């Protein structure tokens, strides 16, 4: 029997539901339970794939090619599980499913309505997905943690709230099968520093008016929650004081599960769910605590010689969540290398010649020159591409460690074609679809040119190394088969690979299908450059806190060596 834990949020968005949901799942995993997660996003989009990163942060890609909300990345990183596209529910998916059934006549002539048809579809979806294992083992998980996106009271989430209300009633018929955690905000107003409980009271009142009764209230705050504040919330929200839990600002995100455990959330959940812990399967909370301490030691380092600066040259730098998994992967690698890492955000357009007289141009180039490594992440469209090409050129000519991801690989190929082969008009079909310039990057023939959503080359794919005599073979632990996640619709033009190879650019990894023409990895020989790597896939999506991604680990190690050689 699967137990359900619903996590809702009140007062405002961005209150930390995703981290609380992930941390709750982690605590249950340390108690030996098998855990899965579901994220509900009330927007009408079918998935996150067509949304701008400025709208909703990065698009996280799963093994099965699902393009989902970035919170699923948090779940995978915290719980070390592998989710699928159905673990992200959207209004668009639910309505499409219901409309398709109506067109097939499956409702037997009934008037199709939000209640019961939409609500029933939500419940059926949740119950079905909750049974799917995500840890590589057979059989259903023990617990499914469900995060309801948005804020209690939002119009667009009402069908999901009603579905959860019905589930809460139905599951409580089986004692302990359903638990609701409400995450709220306790602000401090004015110089007195009093913790205000009214926003939480109103939020819980709204939740209860919709038929959902919280079992736990987790309060976000800047400082530890006082006992008097807990008692007040308990009194006005009908939750016993020990189930009012404070989560104040901590030194690093890995301390959140520890903070919850210190307030006995693990024991309280066991009592609520009416279950007993089982022997832990390899995940110990003590290990998590050791990692949190390790991160604190590194982050508090004041020595300039122990800080590595990585320049992130992108086009969505105005919102750091646009590159959330890339930043996480860099941090994972830095912690493994026992070094503090700082990301230098550089807007690619600010490197371009057209703005050479501006202050932004000067500051951006100064920042690039300061960096110990350069990373060009994925992206779409032609804005900022010339700046990225200039960054790749600077990295190559000055032997600065370089990692290009997806578009970053294509940028490196274009730069090499222009400046080594002398093809000054080398470009990508993405940037100049109608021109007669030499397109060293082309649109993949099997990809739709008319339908955008879900039509890219997506998800888990295998790359085969052509030789063991390459950097990637060493990075990936001396294996010739690499499995990573992809998200792209353009690729290196096979017609020009031979010319580029003769000029010294190494194409060391190819796809494992029958053609073997799709280029996955480029390198420069280590005899000519300390670390110059481009990958068509997105290694950041499989990075874990205790198991950093090989390309990122290689970049950070190479950047650290650059510090050592210059001190």
Image (cartoon, grey):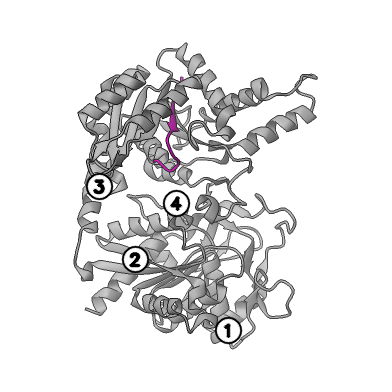
Rendered location of residue 26, percent (x, y): 35, 36
Left-right relation of 276 to 397:
left
In the rendered structure, which disc, 1 or 2, sits on the residue that comes first in sequence?
Answer: 1
Q: Secondary structure at mark 1?
A: helix
Q: Are marks 1 and 4 in contact (CB under 8 Å)?
A: no
Q: Is residue 2 magenta?
A: yes
Rendered location of residue 436, percent (x, y): 73, 80
In the rendered structure, which disc, 3 or 2, sits on the residue that comes first in sequence?
Answer: 3
In the rendered structure, which disc, 4 or 2, sits on the residue that comes first in sequence?
Answer: 4
In the rendered structure, which disc, 3 or 4, sits on the residue that comes first in sequence?
Answer: 3
In this rendered view, identify the residue nearer to me: 554 or 126: 126
Rendered location of residue 272, percent (x, y): 35, 19
Q: Is residue 248 above or below residue 414?
A: above
Q: Secondary structure at mark 3?
A: helix
User: What residue is shown with label 2?
Assistant: 556
In the rendered structure, which disc, 1 or 4, sits on the residue that comes first in sequence?
Answer: 1
How far apart, in angstroms, are the residues tagged by discs 1 and 3?
46 Å
Q: Residues within 10 Å of mark 2 (few under 14, many from 20)?
A: many
User: What residue is shown with label 1?
Assistant: 418
In this rendered view, identify the residue nearer to me: 139 or 263: 263
How far apart, in angstroms, are the residues tagged by discs 1 and 2?
28 Å
In the rendered structure, which disc, 1 or 3, sits on the residue that comes first in sequence?
Answer: 3
User: What residue is shown with label 3?
Assistant: 292
- Which residue is found at the position 25% from the left and 80% from the top? 566
Span highlighted in magenta in the image: 1-15
How far apart, in angstroms, are the residues tagged by discs 1 and 4?
33 Å
How far apart, in angstroms, are the residues tagged by discs 3 and 4?
20 Å
The quadrant holding residue 80 is: top left
User: What residue is shown with label 4?
Assistant: 542
Q: Residues within 10 Å of mark 3 (few under 14, many from 20)?
A: some
């Amino acid at each position: 029997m699967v137990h359900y834990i619903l996590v809702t949020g009140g007062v405002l968005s961005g209150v930390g539901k995703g981290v609380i949901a992930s941390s709750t799942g982690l605590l249950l995993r340390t108690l030996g339970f098998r855990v899965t997660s579901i994220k509900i996003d009330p927007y009408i989009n079918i998935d996150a794939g067509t949304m701008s990163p400025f709208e909703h942060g990065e698009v996280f890609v799963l093994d099965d090619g699902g393009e989902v909300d970035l919170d699923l990345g948090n779940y995978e990183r915290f719980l070390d599980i592998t989710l699928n596209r159905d673990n992200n529910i959207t209004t668009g998916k639910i309505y499409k499913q219901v409309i398709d059934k109506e067109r097939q006549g499956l409702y037997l002539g009934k008037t199709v309505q939000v209640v019961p048809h939409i609500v029933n579809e939500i419940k059926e979806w949740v119950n079905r997905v909750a049974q799917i294992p995500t840890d590589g083992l057979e059989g259903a998980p023990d617990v499914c943690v469900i995060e309801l996106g948005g804020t209690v009271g939002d119009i667009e989430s009402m069908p999901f709230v009603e579905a959860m209300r019905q589930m809460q009633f139905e599951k409580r018929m089986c004692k302990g099968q359903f638990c609701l955690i409400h995450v709220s905000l306790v602000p401090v107003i004015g110089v007195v520093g009093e913790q205000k409980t009214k926003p939480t009271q109103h939020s819980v009142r709204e939740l209860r008016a919709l038929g959902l009764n919280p079992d736990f209230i987790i309060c976000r705050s800047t400082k530890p929650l006082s006992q008097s504040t807990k008692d007040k919330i308990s009194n006005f929200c009908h939750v016993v004081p020990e189930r009012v839990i404070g989560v104040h600002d901590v030194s690093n995100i890995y301390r959140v599960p520890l903070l919850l455990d210190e307030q006995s959330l693990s024991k309280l959940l066991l009592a609520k769910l009416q279950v007993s812990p089982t022997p832990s399967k390899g995940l110990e909370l003590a290990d998590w605590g050791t990692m949190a301490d390790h991160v604190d030691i590194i982050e508090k380092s004041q020595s300039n010689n122990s800080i590595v600066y990585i320049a992130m040259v992108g086009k969505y730098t105005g919102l750091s969540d646009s590159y959330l998994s890339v930043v996480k992967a860099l941090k994972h690698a830095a912690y493994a290398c026992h070094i503090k890492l700082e990301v230098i955000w550089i807007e690619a357009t600010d490197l371009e010649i057209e703005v050479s007289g501006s202050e932004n141009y000067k500051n951006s180039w100064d920042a690039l020159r300061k960096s110990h490594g350069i990373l060009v992440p994925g992206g779409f469209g032609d804005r900022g591409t010339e700046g990225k090409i200039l960054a790749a050129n600077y990295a190559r000519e000055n032997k600065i460690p370089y990692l290009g991801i997806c578009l970053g690989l294509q940028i490196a190929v274009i730069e090499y074609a222009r400046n080594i082969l002398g093809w000054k008009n080398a470009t990508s079909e993405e940037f100049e679809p109608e021109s007669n310039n030499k397109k060293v990057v082309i649109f993949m023939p099997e990809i739709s040119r008319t339908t955008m959503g879900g039509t890219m080359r997506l998800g888990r794919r295998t790359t085969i190394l052509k030789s063991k005599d390459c950097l990637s073979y060493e990075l990936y632990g001396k294996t010739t088969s690499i499995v990573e996640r992809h998200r792209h619709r353009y690729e290196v033009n096979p017609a020009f690979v031979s010319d580029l190879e003769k000029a010294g650019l190494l194409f060391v990894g190819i796809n494992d299908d029958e053609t073997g023409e799709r280029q996955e990895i480029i390198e420069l020989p280590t005899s000519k450059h300390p670390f110059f790597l481009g990958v068509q896939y997105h290694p950041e999506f499989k990075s874990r806190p205790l198991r950093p991604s090989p390309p990122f680990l290689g970049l950070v190690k190479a950047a650290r060596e650059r510090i050592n050689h210059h001190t």
